[in-house]
Amino acid sequence: MNRIKEVLSDKGIKQTWLAQKLEKSFNMVNEYCNNRRQPSLEDLTRIADILDIDVRKLIVSNKTKEDEV
């Protein structure tokens, strides 16, 4: 899962703006934001660059506390 929607909201950026910068359709970016589709590693890196954040801030770990033990 990713945190793209949260980061956009925190920065006050609209999905349409990100779609333009990525040269992707609004529908594609909306699917990324709602975790219906995950961006490729290349696109995730581009999103992080566009939003000027570390790519790790866009990723949510699927590990549970039990997995770490």
Image (cartoon, rainbow, N blue to C red):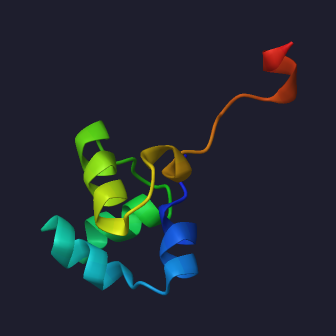
Give the camera-side residue of 20 and 49.
Answer: 49
Count the numbered circles shown: 0
Quarter-of-image position of residue 62: top right
Residue 33 location, x and y as percent? 46, 65
Residue beneath the point at 30% across and 38% down: 41
Residue 10 location, x and y as percent? 57, 78
Q: In this view, does 67 lie above or below 42?
A: above
Residue beneath the point at 50% across and 80% down: 11
Specify whether residue 3 is in view. yes
Residue 39 location, x and y as percent? 33, 48
Q: Is residue 6 above or below residue 9?
A: above
Q: Is residue 11 left or right of residue 44?
A: right
Quarter-of-image position of residue 18: bottom left
User: In the picture, which quadrant includes the C terminus?
Assistant: top right
Residue 48 location, x and y as percent? 36, 56
Specify whether residue 24 is in view. no
Quarter-of-image position of residue 68: top right
Q: In this view, does 6 lie to the left or right of 46?
A: right
Residue beneath the point at 79% across and 18% down: 67
Give the camera-side residue of 60 and 11.
Answer: 11
Residue at the farthest top position: 69
Q: Is residue 35 above or below residue 28?
A: above
